[in-house]
Image (cartoon, grey):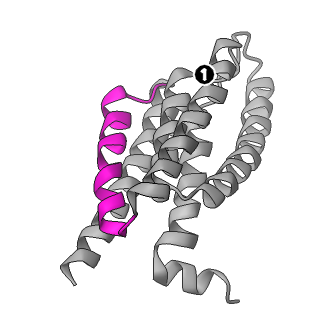
Amino acid sequence: MLDGYFHYGLLAALAIALVIAAFTDMRRRQIDNWLNAGIALGAPLFWWSSGLSLWPGVAMQLGVALAAFAILAGMFALRMMGGGDVKLLTVLALWIEPGWFLKLIIVMALVGGVLTIVMGAWHVMRRQKHKLAIPYGVAISIAGLWVLGTHYFPVAGATAGTG
């Protein structure tokens, strides 16, 4: 029973970290390195509490995170993403199962598109001259919270499909 509390405690800590990432990105357009490091350091504890095997389980998580980092670093080099966003998505790949990580990316893109339209309209309405900066950590965090709520937390996942 204590294993279950520890497991869900780690998931709750990840959810809190995602909320913090969203707020700091909205406020300062920055996701702190200490936050990303904390999320990354919690992943091995989560693997252990989940009973994930070293092969292929942990190897798959590390592989997806490495692939995500390689792709996202390229996007950072092209100035399409911020460094904090790249790091946040990479460390989330350490936690989220590969199939669900793909769903996270899709939800993130949809939320990010809506966020961009809303912030762009607000930018135009206020007739601002400076470059528009989208806090994409908000979209990443919302998508991460969606995955946690629909897949990892059993009560939320059980009620998500009913209606």
Mark 1 packing: few (<14 Cα in 10 Å), some, or many (20+)? many
Q: Which quadrant of the rendered structure holds the C terminus?
A: bottom right
- Of 3 and 111, nearer the camera is 3
User: Eyeballing the image, is 118 above or below 155?
Assistant: above
- Answer whether residue 5 is magenta in the image: no
Residue under the image location 68 percent in, 52 percent down: 102
Q: 59 or 108: nearer the eye?
A: 59
Residue that appears at 70% across and 53% down? 107
- Where, by quadrant of the figure, is residue 162 drawn? bottom right
Residue 44: image location, x then y, percent: 32, 51
Classify 71 as above or below 98: above
Residue drawn 80% across the image and 24% down it: 124
Q: Is residue 83 left or right of residue 37?
A: right
Classify residue 112 as left or right of residue 150.
right
Q: Which residue is mark 1?
A: 73
Magenta part of the chain: 30-52
Quarter that holds the N terminus: bottom left
Magenta stretch containing residue 41, yes or no?
yes
